[in-house]
Amino acid sequence: MENPMGFNRVLLSSTAKLPQPMRAGAGLLASFLPTMYNTEADATITTTQLAGGAILQGLTLTSDVVYTLPTVADLIAEAGFSDMDDGDSYSFYVANNQAAAFDVVIAVGSGMTAIGTNNNLSVAPQSSKIFTLVKVSDAIFALY
């Protein structure tokens, strides 16, 4: 039985004929199971929380908080992510709902690389971002 959370190879059909694997341009398909943070403390996001697809900060902060993604070893050991092939991706949503002037910062876990010279891993107050993890190999994930 497949894990209902985490990476799933979605099958799509634009013509009601036989489905095809999800591919670039198919859009973000998700049923979120959000993790709500209501404390002002840095934390490591678990694979289960990441698999829920949504990380939400609801507290008015007095400083930035840093949420560190799981390690690549933890991800590939998780049933919901172990089916990923090289080149497969998993997108997740991060929202900073607080009203003050402090950011939620996403930090890469061991074995991950933030891609792009302007890859800003901060989510400003009252805003959100969608991040995408791409499996490069069994030891490396790229974060966009």
Image (cartoon, rainbow, N blue to C red):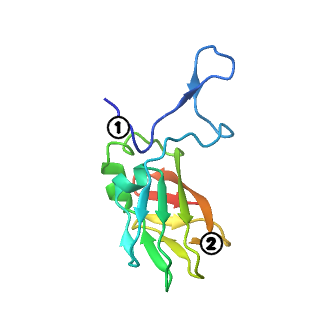
Residue 139: percent from the left, percent from the top? 40, 57
Residue 50: percent from the left, percent from the top? 42, 55
* Pick the front one: 21 or 54: 54
Q: Which quadrant would the N terminus be assigned to in this image? A: top left
Residue 19: percent from the left, percent from the top? 58, 20
Seen at 47% across and 73% down, the residue is 59
Seen at 63% across and 66% down, the residue is 127
Q: Is residue 48 left or right of residue 21?
A: left
* Pick the front one: 56 or 66: 56
* Pick the front one: 92 or 72: 92
Residue 116: percent from the left, percent from the top? 65, 67
Q: Earlier in the sequence, mark 2 or mark 1?
A: 1
- What kind of residue is marked 1? Asn
Q: Which quadrant would the C terminus be assigned to in this image? A: bottom right
How packed is label 2: few (under 14 Cα within 10 Å), some, or many (20 or more)? few
Residue 120, label in figure: 2
- What kind of residue is marked 2? Asn
Farthest residue, direction top: 17
The CA distance from mark 2 to mark 1 is 31 Å
Seen at 60% across and 43% down, the residue is 28
Which residue is denoted by mark 1 in the rendering? 3
Seen at 58% across and 80% down, the residue is 100
Q: Is residue 14 above or below residue 98?
A: above
